[in-house]
Image: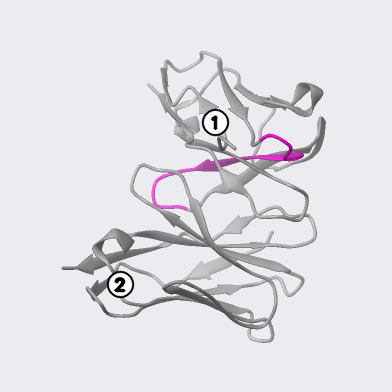
Amino acid sequence: QKEVEQNSGPLSVPEGAIASLNCTYSDRGSQSFFWYRQYSGKSPELIMSIYSNGDKEDGRFTAQLNKASQYVSLLIRDSQPSDSATYLCAVSGNDYKLSFGAGTTVTVRA
Amino acid sequence: DTGVSQNPRHKITKRGQNVTFRCDPISEHNRLYWYRQTLGQGPEFLTYFQNEAQLEKSRLLSDRFSAERPKGSFSTLEIQRTEQGDSAMYLCASSLVSEEQYFGPGTRLTVT
């Protein structure tokens, strides 16, 4: 069973600032890493996937992966009130089952 | 591509009753996953199918839970003799093998 830990929230940032979310995982054999966004009462929505070490940027989102440190992060630039949600880190191995962290709740203050 | 759909969206049942949920994956996705999510936690893996074959069941899944995916299309998850601890959001996701998983809207189960 893969363990996935996320920094405890909630995280409150002013509008326009950078929100930084962190995630560590226990299984060194993990191969695929994902960030999901979940609004209250809704299901998880995939926002980023990353498979190799380094940075991956998609619009205002940047995911960073360091397999040696077993660490994944998500940066949200120019945070907007619509970014207020819970962000879930998920990890999978060669069986492709997802193991999730408990999530970090982000609140963007207008 | 209409996305993953789940029915019903909400289900309230009395303890001891049986319930069945349905998931329709994205067409041509050959993998289908069931997860369960309780308040304040991330989703927990329950079981998954590749086409019609059920490849793995979590030890979280007691013998009161059964899942099927006849003909490799839609899937059903049945819970027999429901207990209050079964109250949760039941999420279905689909993917192509080795690709990203996309979730349906979920079925919220309340056992009274």
Label 2, residues with CA under 10 Å away: few <14, some 14-19, many ≥20: many
Q: Amino acid at mark 2?
A: Ser
Q: Amino acid at mark 1?
A: Ser
Q: Residue at x 45, y 18 (%)?
A: B15
Quadrant holding the C terminus of chain A: bottom left
Is residue B88 toward the left or the right of residue A53 in the image?
left
Q: Residue at x 52, y 21 (%)?
A: B82
Residue A25 on image: x %, y % = 61, 72
Residue B46 on image: x %, y % = 65, 41
* Circle 2 chain: A
Residue B17 on image: x %, y % = 51, 13
Give the numbered dot on residue A36: none
Q: Is residue A78 above or below residue B110?
A: below
Under circle 2, the secondary element is loop
Give the numbered dot on residue B5: 1
Q: Residue at x 66, y 32 (%)?
A: B62
Q: Which residue is mark 2?
A: A79
Label 1, residues with CA under 10 Å away: few <14, some 14-19, many ≥20: many
Quadrant holding the N terminus of chain A: bottom right
Type of colouring: one colour
Q: Quadrant of residue B111?
A: top left
Stretch of the chain drawn in magenta: B27-41
